[in-house]
């Protein structure tokens, strides 16, 4: 299993995987952070396709073509805004990962890359988000061998270290 989960530091828009995940806002029309980077790299055709999707609710996901990206697809998911943790944020973040992974299965996607969903402007505590991301993905991959590799793409050292720690905790929970 550990070989199917990778943590890297880099630019998600440059990855040669079947699909990348966009930490989108509910309009799906682009924004800041990774969302804006993906829209810029994919080109205006992505925006045009997103306009036809009618937005997306928190915890759900929708798929588009990748256009000018190396990835064939972009799976857009809307993570929760952190409001202290008692407003269903953990369940909604879990749902983001589950929905993206189910879409990956449906489209025959074998390799997939996730950003740190909700960890930017949405303010989700990084260590908690990383733990959810790793656990949800590992549990899904245990049941679905069709997905060969999931990469978590971290844009800075703090996020990278949180994801590394979450992955190690999954395999060595008492250390």
Image: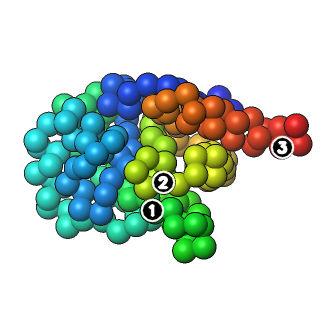
On the rendered image, what quadrant is the C terminus found in?
A: top right
Can the viewer see residue 114? yes
Q: Residues within 10 Å of mark 1 (few under 14, many from 20)?
A: some
**Inter-mark Cα distance, 2 to 3:** 26 Å
**Inter-mark Cα distance, 2 to 1:** 6 Å
**Inter-mark Cα distance, 3 to 1:** 28 Å
Q: Residues within 10 Å of mark 2 (few under 14, many from 20)?
A: some
Q: Which residue is mark 2?
A: 123
Judged left or right of residue 158, residue 135 is: right
Q: Residue at x 77, y 41 (%)?
A: 169
Check residue 81 in the rendering and tell me which mark sits there, or answer none: 1
Q: Between residue 47 and residue 108, name the one nearer to us.
A: 47
Q: Which residue is mark 3?
A: 173
Q: Residue at x 45, y 62 (%)?
A: 81
Q: Earlier in the sequence, mark 2 or mark 1?
A: 1
Q: How is the image coloured?
A: rainbow
Asked if labels 1 and 2 touch by Cβ distance under 8 angstroms, the answer is yes
| Mark 1 element type | loop
Q: Earlier in the sequence, mark 2 or mark 3?
A: 2
Judged left or right of residue 124, residue 10 is: left
Can the viewer see residue 95? no
Q: Earlier in the sequence, mark 3 or mark 1?
A: 1
């Amino acid at each position: 299993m550990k070989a199917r989960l990778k943590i890297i530091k880099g630019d998600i828009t440059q990855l040669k995987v079947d699909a990348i995940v966009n930490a989108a806002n509910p309009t799906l029309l682009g924004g800041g952070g990774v969302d804006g980077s993906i829209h810029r790299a994919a080109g205006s055709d992505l925006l045009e396709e997103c306009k036809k999707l009618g937005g997306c609710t928190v915890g759900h996901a929708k798929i588009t073509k990748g256009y000018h990206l190396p990835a064939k697809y972009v799976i857009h998911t809307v993570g929760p805004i952190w409001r202290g943790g008692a407003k269903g944020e953990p369940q909604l973040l879990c749902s983001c990962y589950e929905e993206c992974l189910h879409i990956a299965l449906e489209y025959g996607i074998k390799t997939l890359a996730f950003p740190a969903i909700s960890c930017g402007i949405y303010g989700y505590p990084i260590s908690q988000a990383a733990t959810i991301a790793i656990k949800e993905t590992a549990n899904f991959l245990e049941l679905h061998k069709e997905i060969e590799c999931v990469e978590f793409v971290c844009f800075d050292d703090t996020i990278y270290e949180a994801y590394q720690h979450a992955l190690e905790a999954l395999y060595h929970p008492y250390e």
